[in-house]
Image: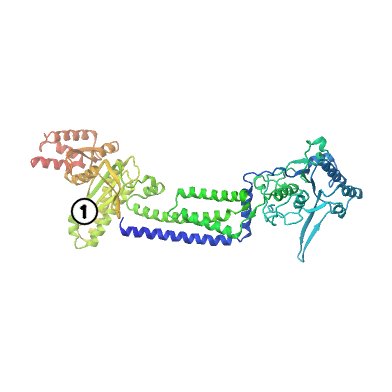
Amino acid sequence: MRTQEKVRQARQTGSRQLRLLVLSLTTLIVISFLSRLPAWSLLELRSFDYLSTVDDPRPPPGGPVIVAIDEPSLADINAQWPWPRSLHAELITQLRAAGARVIGLDIIMAEPSNPDNDAAITKAVGPDTVLAGDETLIETPQASQLIRATPLPQLTEAGAVTGIASIDLSGDGIFRRIPGYEDGFAAMLAKVAGVAPEVLPAGTLIQSFGPARSYPTVSYYQALDPKGLLPPDFFKDRVVLVGLSLQNAPAIDKGGVDAFATPYTVHTGKLVSGVEIQATIYDNIRRGLSIAEARLPTVAACILISVLLAATTVWRSTGWLTVVTSAAALLAFAAVSAAGIRLAHVFVSPLGPTVAYISVVFGQAAFDFAEERRNKRQITRAFAQYISPDLVKRLSNDPSQLKLGGERRTLSVLFSDVRGFTTIAETLKDDPEQLTGLINRLLTPLSDVVMDHGGTIDKYMGDCIMAFWNAPLDDPDHALHAVRASLAMQAAISRLNGELEREAAELGRKPHILKMGVGINTGECIVGNMGSTRRFDYSCLGDSVNLASRLEGASKNYGVALLLGEETARLVANTYTVVELDRIIVKGRTVPSPVFTVVHKADAEALAAHQAFIETKYAATLVPSDPVFDRLSADIPELANYYAIVRDALTEGGE
């Protein structure tokens, strides 16, 4: 490749890469601003919901057992809620007798009730009992007030431990974080159970364990009679949580009593009871399974790596492979984030790297697409100079139909030339503007005819046009279209002559009458982009092309405007009346080639007489005085000049 071409390509590549660098830097800046928006944080948390639950983790072994205050219990006990505290006292007694290690009641008992019932529950609780408290922030225009509700003093005096059961919800109403209470309900359960809990910072993300009812759960009425209704040792050495679990897995759109959305809600659309949430917090504390959020430097580094990876992906070009690579990269971001959650208990949001990667890759792809469209329009405009707009559109929609570099195809090739144009040019040598105008007025309608009939203009050679059919697009009727185009070209020449005669009459001068000869041949050729590395044309070459050119030159020797090769004549014989004129040996060929022309007004008898005339001509038995010349000239007036030429040749001593 020449140095100039290399410089041009290097300049284009440099411009593209500079644009990619600017896009990458812009992406980093934009994501930095977006990440400060509350909506961005919620999107990151939603990605956490999916990634922390995608492998469907289940409660760790040895975790809490839940005693559910549910619909079957309400039906069996048949008492109005809230139940008398004496019933809870009986439950505590039964659970302790069944070997429960710790008993946690996720039930607020901050107000006195029936004295006998309060006395019963006070007698039942002890150091192995954790009772729920609640903390609520009341905000008014005047002030903010924090209200804490704790169990009755006599209960704590009896040894019961208080644990705050309040939880914090994210901005989208989903429970995801460890509550920020040192005396939280789950933390007190762990303390009473003698578990050495992990020290978890407030707000650490929680690991959920399945949808609703994932923990071992029995109904309240069953726990009142564990020996009769439950397997042996069901509660032995277990932490037992008691709480509301109404409406088994209630739907999120209907809400529920003490039920909340969790990360699993994105999969099930169901809420999880508050008592199960406390069990989940307990397991996170005792097993150290909570998940810390990555710090800002780590997140920024991941986004930067994503941008660099994206820039590397599209550094040279974009295409179908870019889509595959991008899909793999995005899956990798999600997989790495999920692995961080599961293996390191750290959540690095894939949102930033994903948005950064997509922005760079698809931003550059958009630039490349626009550039390709611009180049496509340039190519379309260039091809529109040679082939019809319909064909250009077809090529544009399906470039696979255009095979560049050369291929072997059967084409119908047309050459047209204006007779005596050299004389006209000599006459107008002192008026180049008029000569140029005449050429343009001649070539414009002829070119339009070629393109309107689906042809491809190969080149202009002065007043001569070379065109072909059946490339670059397939055209099963290429020979027929070429012949139709030649006849339309003759009609266009007639119209132009009429215009020139009127103009010459107005100016009082002799008109330039134009006559055109056309040669068409069909055969196998090589067609494609031919030329040098700096300039090439879509052209064809081959013996069939040479014969078409020779036919155009030979047409004047037979007094006809159109001369067809044998294969062309055969292909159009069902549409047009073609007649044979001679067998000639053109320059560069040694085998005689039959040549034909098209006639429009000839009956069957005249055509039979013409064929007999041709056979007699080939047999060399014609004589100038044969009356067949006059008879055929009258029957087929389109060939009158041809018959006269043949007679003159015989008169002068032969062909």
Q: Residue at the bottom extreme? A: 142
Q: Is residue 147 left or right of residue 119?
A: left
Q: Nearer the viewer, residue 604 or 243?
A: 243
Image quadrant containing the N terminus: bottom left
Residue 45 rendering spot, x and y as whole percentages: 63, 53
Q: Nearer the viewer, residue 291 or 372?
A: 291
Q: Residue at the right extreme? A: 116
Q: Amino acid at mark 1?
A: Ile
Residue 173 rendering spot, x and y as whole percentages: 69, 53
Q: Is residue 165 left or right of residue 476?
A: right
Residue 104 rendering spot, x and y as whole percentages: 79, 48
For numbered disc 1, what is the local secondary structure?
loop
**Residue designated by label 1:** 513
Q: Is residue 580 left or right of residue 191?
A: left
Tell me the colour scheme of the image: rainbow
Picture quadrant of residue 218: top right
Image quadrant containing the C terminus: top left
Q: Nearer the viewer, residue 654 or 318?
A: 318
Question: How many numbered markers are drawn?
Answer: 1
Dot 1, crowdedness within 10 Å: few (<14), some or many (≥20)? Answer: some
Picture quadrant of residue 4: bottom left
Residue 31 rendering spot, x and y as whole percentages: 56, 60
